[in-house]
């Protein structure tokens, strides 16, 4: 147990340049507290002590702002940076050396039973505000861009962005021309632009009809 705790602390020093001392990390890093609390909750969950497991989970949520269901399976060296607003569902499975930023949801898409949450393989990075929903798989070494909504499987060594999420880099090769967080698809803006173009087309058509009507009037 203490070896795993030391490994968790070392992981934070490896990932976060702001970490200055072990004392600071142990006392102030909410992501670390959430991971440690989850291990206790998960152990209780496996022993079918469901109420106690959920109680530990909710107490951890109250103090850290991170909600991890006791049933979730989490590998080694999970790094949760900042962490506020993170939600990890019951049947979620997370591999080793995964990094998750604040506001991420690893959730389901409905009321289905059984495996209904994502499987996250090793060395995956999930950026701020991303939503990974349903019983899908994020392949090893992949990255999920900030604010993305991922509803389909992501191959290994890929980068996915957008709403809904689309693979833009696969095995180091660009699938699209750009990968900039400020250029993520905005469906509302796209819809407004489409409506604006349609209005311009209708206005042009109305003017054309008015000209035809005026010419007929002059001819009469």
Image (cartoon, helix red, strand yellow):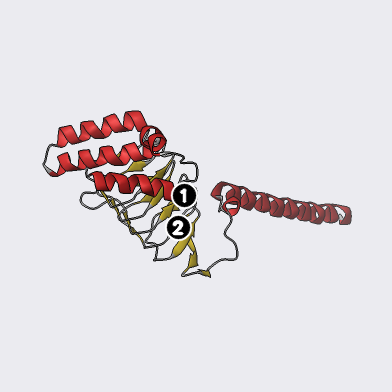
Q: Identify the residue at image location x=47%, y=51%.
A: 148
Decide if residue 193 is on the left or right side of residue 91. Answer: right
Q: Secondary structure at mark 1?
A: loop
Q: Identify the residue at image location x=40%, y=50%.
A: 99
Quadrant holding the N terminus: top left
Decide if residue 48 is on the left or right side of residue 212. Answer: left
Decide which of tag 1 and tag 2 comes sooner along the chain: 1
Residue 102 falls in image quadrant:
top left
Structural crowding at the residue carrying mark 2, measured as other residues with C-alpha within 10 Å and reported as few (<14), some (14–19) or many (≥20): many
Q: Disc 1 designates what residue? A: 127
Image height of 160 relative to 39, above or below: below
Decide if residue 79 is on the left or right side of residue 46. Answer: right
Tell me where residue 11 appears, x and y as whole percent.
Answer: 38, 49
Tell me where residue 162 appears, x and y as whole percent.
Answer: 50, 54
Q: Disc 2 designates what residue? A: 143
Q: Can see residue 109? A: no
Tell me where residue 100 appears, x and y as whole percent.
Answer: 41, 48
User: CB of mark 1 within 8 Å of CB of mark 2?
Assistant: yes
Q: Secondary structure at mark 2?
A: strand
Tell me where residue 110 appears, x and y as whole percent.
Answer: 30, 46
Q: Identify the residue at image location x=39%, y=39%.
A: 22
The numbered dot on residue 192 is none
């Amino acid at each position: 147990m203490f070896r795993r705790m030391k490994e968790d602390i070392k992981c934070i020093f490896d990932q976060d340049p702001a970490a200055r001392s072990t004392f600071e990390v142990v006392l102030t890093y909410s992501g670390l507290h959430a991971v440690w609390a989850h291990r206790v909750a998960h152990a209780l969950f496996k022993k079918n002590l469901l109420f106690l497991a959920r109680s530990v989970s909710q107490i951890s949520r109250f103090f850290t702002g991170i909600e991890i269901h006791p049933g979730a399976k989490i590998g080694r060296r999970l790094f949760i940076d900042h962490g506020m607003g993170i939600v990890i569902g019951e049947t979620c499975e997370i591999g080793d050396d995964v990094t998750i930023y604040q506001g991420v949801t690893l959730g389901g898409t409905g009321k289905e039973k059984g495996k209904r949450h994502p499987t996250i393989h090793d060395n995956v990075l999930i950026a701020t505000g991303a939503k990974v929903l349903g019983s899908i798989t994020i392949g090893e070494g992949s990255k999920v861009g900030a604010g993305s909504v991922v509803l389909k499987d992501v191959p290994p060594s890929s980068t996915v962005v957008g709403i809904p999420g689309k693979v833009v880099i696969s095995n180091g090769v660009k699938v699209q021309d750009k990968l900039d967080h400020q250029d993520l698809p905005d469906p509302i803006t796209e819809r407004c632009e489409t409506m604006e173009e349609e209005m311009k087309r209708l206005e042009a058509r109305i003017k054309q009809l008015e000209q035809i009507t005026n010419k007929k009037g002059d001819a009469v």
